[in-house]
Image (cartoon, grey):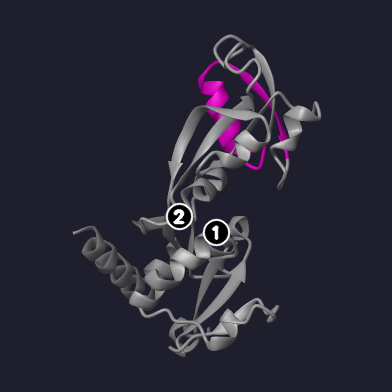
Amino acid sequence: MTDPVSRPLTFAVPKGRILDEALPVMARAGVVPESAFHDKADRSLSFNCEDPALRLIRVRAFDVATFVAFGAADVGIVGSDVIEEFNYSELYAPVDLDIGHCRLSVAEPVEGAGAAGPYNASHLRVATKYPGITKRWFEAAGVQAECIKLNGAMELAPSLGLSGRIVDLVSTGKTLAQNGLKETQVIMQVSARLIVNRVALKTDPRVAALVERFRANAEKEAA
């Protein structure tokens, strides 16, 4: 059997909005990618780090949770929305990094917004990238939600008749307004979390040490 300490730890980071905020947080914990990581023309997905005991993989945010849950990566950074959507028992999220703040919300066309709220309808069609969270939230309100899975351009769904509402991440609300939509309910507040594979945390002391570095820095920033 291969000694886990003999191989680099694999750290999964998300492409997109969280990454720019995550890099300084990672650096304070000693996770610094090689210079090629910052090369916009480099299409690589795997990178070395200044610390040879670490390597980075850069994948879609939704895939970070899957890579870590199934042990392909030991540690990762991802939004709490993704953690909640997949609800993998193999994941542990020990540190709130206090970055990537936004909210997951229900939105609908401005015209008629609230006229048929979730408590006044028995069935709704909702476009979302988060069918798990969406179904659970509407079910708690006594509403059967038919979820149409989209990976982007969510704001187009109501105007094209695909759905009556959407559930998506909201930061400023400008994109919603530009597409004639209004935020009507907040499902959850979102921030980025450090996640680890539970087995790796128990079997590889380097994972626990990395968690403690991130935790110490988070507590220092909050003080």
Picture quarter containing residue 149? top right
Of the residues shown, which amino acid type is indicated by label 2? Gly
Q: Residues within 10 Å of mark 1 (few under 14, many from 20)?
A: few
Question: Is residue 99 one of those drawn in magenta?
Answer: no
Q: Which range of residues does the magenta coloring cover?
A: 128-149
Q: Secondary structure at mark 1?
A: helix
Of the residues shown, which amino acid type is indicated by label 1? Arg
For marks 1 and 2, the one nearer the N-term is 1
Q: Secondary structure at mark 2?
A: loop
Taking the image as shown, residue 199 lies to the left or right of residue 112, namely left
Mark 1 and mark 2: span between their CA atoms?
7 Å
Kindly identify which residue carries mark 1: 17
The image position of residue 121, as x and y in percent, is: 63, 11
Kindly identify which residue carries mark 2: 100
**Residue placed at 44% from the left, 55% from the top?**
192
**Residue placed at 29% from the left, 63% from the top?**
218
Taking the image as shown, residue 41 lies to the left or right of residue 68, namely right
Q: Residues within 10 Å of mark 2 (few under 14, many from 20)?
A: many
Rendered position, 34 above or below 172? below
